[in-house]
Image: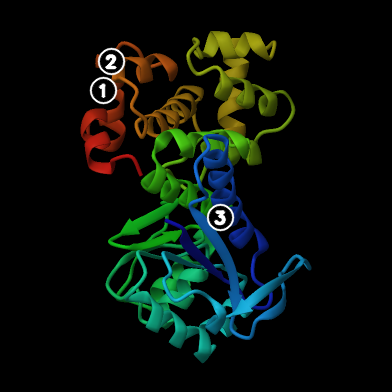
Amino acid sequence: MLQHVVIAVYPDFELLDAAGPASVFASANHALAEDGEPHRYAVHLVSPTGGAVPSSSGVVVETKALGQVPRQLDTILVAGAEAGAITAAARTPELGRWLSRSASSVRRLGSVCAGTFVLAAAGLVDGKRVATHWSACEPLARLYPSLTVDADALYVVEGNVWTSAGVTTGIDMALAMVNEDLGGMIASRVAERLVLYARRPGYQSQFSPLLRAQAKADGPFADLLVWAQANLDTALDVPSLAARVSLSERTFHRRFVAAMGETPARYIETVRLDAARILLSQDLPLKEIARRVGLAPTARFTQVFQRRFGVTPRLFRETHGSR
């Protein structure tokens, strides 16, 4: 059965907030076609007035008016934007009324990035835990105090409401929807087709340890961090890391702490655990996860994980599930 997915946009919306999820659903259709199966998704871009709508990047997209979409909708997503554009969208009465009318009959209602403001303005997420872009968390919580704004999650699912942190996290959230609809095999093929490094679960932090570190590092340290991320299953102790950048252990440790604000051991442990949380969303045995992230044996992995997060890897997996 064809599922109609509507992505609502407005002047100066963030293009990737709409194009990212749309590409995921289109790629799912492609994967199904390869298996001789019919398409599952029909994606519609809509706007309050219909017609050509400019994005913040200058790309203009053609949209349908709100009243032109099919009556039986499966999923509605609202794209995000910068402060001025999202404020205007949240104050657009036609969009708010349409969302309010449609919300009760759709299987999934969601937003990407600051699109959460539009849902909140329409009264559709009152009392719920939601996600939005990290830069918008404080104003969202201030304007709508009934919300629990998760400033860390990539995306949040509460009931039939899906909200994501923004931009590329809309891709992660759409992949989770495909996983829910069509299973992990199709979702993984979509991720491969889109050349994604990993299918990121919603509970993963918006803030990548590697990106944070790269912002501080330069020269040989920048290359070292990328190499370490790709070689977590190897020994990443100070002697090994220092040798890789041709420094004495003492000099390496001193320069690393000065540049990164933390010890090499602490940084490597953080990166290992970040990778472990991603792998826990898959059906891999704990023994294999521990090996892949360099925390074998399993007893050591469990000890390190519990010390950092307060729960065992097994309980973390049970609590967070596949999303």
Q: Residue furthest bottom?
A: 93
Frontmost residue, 189 versus 137: 189
Residue 262: image location, x then y, percent: 50, 32
Quadrant where the C terminus sits is top left
Q: Judge left or right: residue 165 versus residue 197.
A: left
Say which quarter of the image contains residue 259: top right
For disc 2, the marked residue is 298
Residue at 42%, 43% in the rendered image = 204
Q: Judge left or right: residue 90 versus residue 280.
A: right
Q: Disc 3, disc 1: CB below 8 Å?
A: no
Q: Amino acid at mark 2?
A: Thr
Q: Disc 1, disc 2: CB below 8 Å?
A: yes
Frontmost residue, 122 versus 67: 67
For disc 3, the marked residue is 21
Render colour scheme? rainbow
CA gap, disc 3 and disc 1? 35 Å
For disc 1, the marked residue is 302
